[in-house]
Image (cartoon, helix red, strand yellow):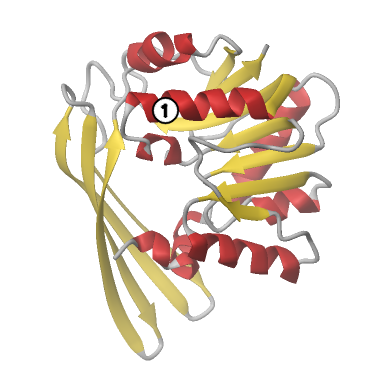
Amino acid sequence: MSLYDYPRYYDLVYGSDWKAECEFLTGVFDRYVDGKTKRILEPACGTGRLMFRLEREGLLVDGLDLNEKAVTYCNRRLIKHGFRPSARVADMTDFQVSSKYCAAFNTINSFRHLEHHAQARDHLRCMARAIRKGGVYVLGLHLSPVSGDPVEEESWIARRGHLCVQTSMWLVERNLKKRYERFQMRYDIWTPTNHQVLDDQFNFRTYSQHQFEQELLSEIPKFEIAATYDFSYKLDRPIHVDQHSEDVVYILKRV
């Protein structure tokens, strides 16, 4: 059982920050993309929680994801709001596009589900092929700080109508030498007549600043770092990434 097979709950759990993210993304596109931004791609789009909202801003947004249930949920919602069913089932490490995009985004750590160096490299190569020169890829991920204590557990509550989901996530195992973290995630789901619990475990690949920037990104010469931010999504507050950094949003410029 995967929590990604429950798109209604997933969408609620990760949907609360949509306004800050949308405003940040449109601001990034205006500031860092050369020329007008029109066509956008979201790899690992999941339920498309940002796709239809960016469509409302006049952008044409396509998505891809491996989970068929999430893609179906995403397309149904796009149609409901009067937009194209523009999500498709595809592997973010091996996909083709018919024409290039102005920009792309992946903001909630989905990139770290690629557990091996070759997968991460292949994904970035696909993105470099998919984005036109002068475009950007907005990539958000948690780095492993070299010093200081990283976050090892999180908990938050989201509500929509009569549905309430409390999400708890905690570290099960971390092995920086083998480059993985295993997390447990639990949904406590309440409706007026029922309480349900769903559990799942998943792995994230770990990255220090050096491992991401020098070991991985250096293999993708068509991308350069144009700016860096944190997960507060404040366009007027770029950050300097160092060994203490944890939550980082990279603005990768296609050159």
Quadrant of the frame with the N terminus: bottom left
Total numbered labels placed on residues in the image: 1
Residue 42, above or below 8: above
Look at the image and tell me whether residue 115 can be seen.
yes
Front-lying residue, 41 or 184: 41
Residue 134, above or below 53: above
Residue 151 figure quarter: top left
Please state the horizontal and vertical placement of residue 120, each as a whole percent of the image: 42, 28
- Residue, x 80% and y 47% (percent of image)? 57
Look at the image and tell me whether residue 236 can be seen.
no
Residue 196 figure quarter: bottom left
Residue that mark 1 sits on = 120
- Residue type beneath disc 1: Ala
Query: Of helix, strand and loop, which one carries label 1?
Result: helix
Q: Is residue 171 left or right of residue 78?
A: left
Residue 112 figure quarter: top left
Please state the horizontal and vertical placement of residue 58, each as a whole percent of the image: 84, 47
Please state the horizontal and vertical placement of residue 108, each as a whole percent of the image: 47, 41
Front-lying residue, 57 or 233: 57
Q: Is residue 170 left or right of residue 51?
A: left
Near mark 1 (Cα within 10 A), the count class, few <14, some 14-19 or many ≥20, is many
- Residue, x 48% and y 52% (percent of image)? 66
- Residue, x 24% and y 16% (percent of image)? 146
Please state the horizontal and vertical placement of residue 35, each as a whole percent of the image: 85, 22
- Residue, x 51% and y 39% (percent of image)? 92
Q: Is residue 240 left or right of residue 201?
A: right
Quadrant of the frame with the C terminus: top right
